Amino acid sequence: TKSLKETLQEVIPAKQEQLKRLKTEHGQAVVGDVKIENIIGGMRGLKAMLWDASVLDPNEGIRFHGLSIPDCQKVLPPAPGGKEIIAESMLWLLLTGQVPTPEQTRQLSRELAEKGELPAFVESLVDSLPTTLHPMTQLGIGVAALNRDSSFQAAYEMGMKKSEYWTHTLDDCINLIARLPVLAARIYRNVYKPGNPLPAINKDLDLVGNYSNLLGYGDNQSLTEYLRLYIALHGDHEGGNASAHTAHLVGSTLSDPYLSYSAALFALAGPLHGLANQEVLRWQLAMQKEIGNVISNENIRDYLWKTLKSGQVVPGYGHGVLRKPDPRFIALQEFCNTRPDLKDSHIIQLVNKTSEIAPDVLKEHGKTKNPYPNVDATSGCVLYHYGFTEFKYYTVIFGVSRALGALTQLVWARALGLPLERPKSYSMDALEKLVKQ
Ligand code: NMX
Ligand code: MLT
């Protein structure tokens, strides 16, 4: 059985050749125009990044190396006894473009479990943080501190060759992915269950099986399977989303993967990005409080208008690229539909009904380019149903997941020798001068 590193070693040369060809033969080809609306509009629509692992189609949603979510559900190996995609098989696909065998997936699970321990100083650091500090801030601090053991940084100081960058980056990325659940679970324990002992890592379990155990939910197979699916599906969303883009930008300075991903986590912590899953639950619960137990179209419509008229966004709706319901939202809803306890849950029924009513209200409101639900419209509400109610923690789970895609790209950026990211900026005066010419 070929290991992950051996598989990568085989696929990298062809990609290096492809990049060389694009550069030398097509470097001057025009891909699109840059309009002033792109420059002042958050670069929306600008085709300006290289990212191989996934592509987001506005109508069809995400594909990972060409595979849709239902394709992945068919071909990617699950955990023994489970059905859902697991982090390891998604990571293998993202990194290599290949579907791993069950054996390769198990081998990677074991490697991650063996590398999962946190250095003692990181444990003390995280334990010393005030429990009032947002769990995402704690996660970012912990991840940054892990850079003390960065293989990339140590080798860079010793003068490593450029051709060796990617192997050290891969070592750091695997170590970080292995340690993230342990770090994230420690933060959960410290903030919400102080004094509870943390179980040891089980070397025979997959990454998310261990994460669920460490969080104290290991006995709940249904929730563990939900977490597996959630973490696989949030893994990558092409290159331009704020967290992955941040990791790429910071990584392009040759900051090590720990520092790069720590920065990405602080982008994920914003309410227009990953924090939306926390905000959705808060909003749906406020709706539930106001409308009581009667879930009617009128009640939901009124509440949506109340939110919009008070100048707030409807959390969980809209997207920078998508123009149809997010297939990740659909996959999570389908997970709920196959389980009777989830199907009958009050909060999930409220989410479903809201997703039927909100698009028309948002269309009538007339601002958002995409009136449909994104993944955050349901992801946290399902956790709430399971009794995992600490909603300020929800984005941390997203943070454990996004490492799969963002770190994949760091490995590839080093393997391809991608340069420092440094776009050109303009002042408003300069733009006005430009259009008057
Ligand atoms: N509710 C109300 N107004 C909205 C919404 C919404 N859900 N979505 C967009 N708009 C407004 C937006 O604020 C903007 O208004 P203005 O012209 O006054 O600035 C206008 O519609 C046009 O925005 P768009 O071009 O449609 O959206 P954009 O690409 O700028 O932003 C989001 C995308 C995702 C930031 C935006 O849709 C939003 O704020 N959604 C709610 C928060 C959310 O669910 N974020 C999670 C995204 C997914 N994730 O996991 O990261
Ligand atoms: C994501 O998963 O990163 C979000 O859907 C936001 C995005 O793609 O811009």
Image: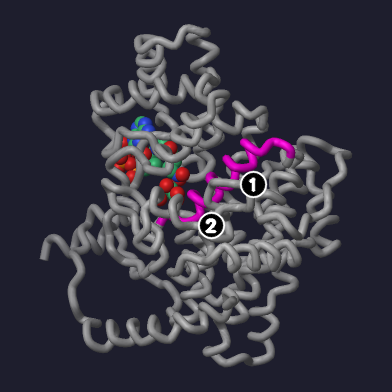
Q: What residue type is labelled 1?
A: Met
Image quadrant in which the C terminus is located: bottom left
Q: Give the range drawn in magenta.
A: 219-237
Q: Which amino acid does label 2 sit on?
A: Pro
Q: Which residue is label 1 attached to? A: 136
Q: Is residue 218 left or right of residue 412?
A: right
181 sits to left or right of 314: right
The answer, for residue 271, to whether it is visible in the render is yes
Query: For residue 381: magenta?
Result: no
Work out whether residue 144 can be spotted.
no
Q: Name the residue under label 2.
A: 77
- Looking at the image, the residue that sits furthest to the left is 437
- Residue 406 place in picture, x, y as percent: 51, 62
The image quarter in which residue 123 lies: bottom right
Element on which disc 2 rests = loop
Secondary structure mostly seen in the magenta stretch:
helix
Residue at point 54%, 60% (across, down): 89
Q: Is residue 235 above or below residue 132?
A: below
